[in-house]
Image (tube, grey):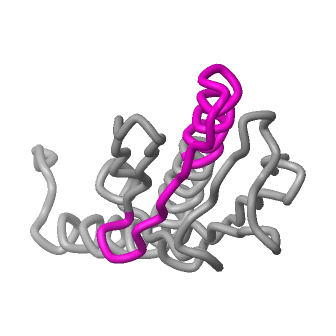
Amino acid sequence: MRTPKGVTLIELLVVLVVASVMAALALPRVRAIADRSAVRHAADEVRTVLALARQRAVSLAQPVAVLVDSVSDAITIGDAQGSMSAHAVGAAFGVTLRATRDSVAFSPIGLGWGATNTSVVVTRGWVAETVTVSRAGRIK
């Protein structure tokens, strides 16, 4: 008697159903990991841009402003000489930016100008991270 070589259609369908159920269970976790990674890297980019602006204020010995555009999810550095550099954080990482103030300014000695601390919230999906600039110019 010969044994059949190969698989039946029913066996193939069972394997496909099991594989699709496992993929459906894994997809939310993969998406959450991707969101967490994007938010972490975008928050690091925001911190880097703010630190760059502070360093530029000290090196030029003049005030430097950082504008947070929540519509285009971008950050722009501008100084008194009119030079500007734009950083499209939202487009680069697929995140949205919200800020308590639309701008932050650093004094020539690196202190933050303004009456209050400024927070920039970076979000994607259910993941959020807050970057804070204190009046002393510290970036957390």
Above-or-below relation of 136 to 122: above
| Observer-nearest of 58 and 70 | 58
Above-or-below relation of 120 to 21: above
Residue 79 in percent (x, y) is at 47, 41
Q: Residue at x 77, y 57 (%)?
A: 133
Instruction: State the residue lying farthest toward the right.
Output: 136
Q: Residue at x 85, y 59 (%)?
A: 135
Asked if residue 129 lies in the magenta stretch, the reply is no
Residue 75 found in image quarter: bottom left
Residue 19 in percent (x, y) is at 34, 65
| Observer-nearest of 21 and 10 | 21
Q: Residue at x 65, y 44 (%)?
A: 47
| Observer-nearest of 4 and 73 | 73
Residue 118 in percent (x, y) is at 72, 68
Asked if residue 53 lies in the magenta stretch, the reply is yes
Q: Where does the magenta region start and end?
A: 46-73
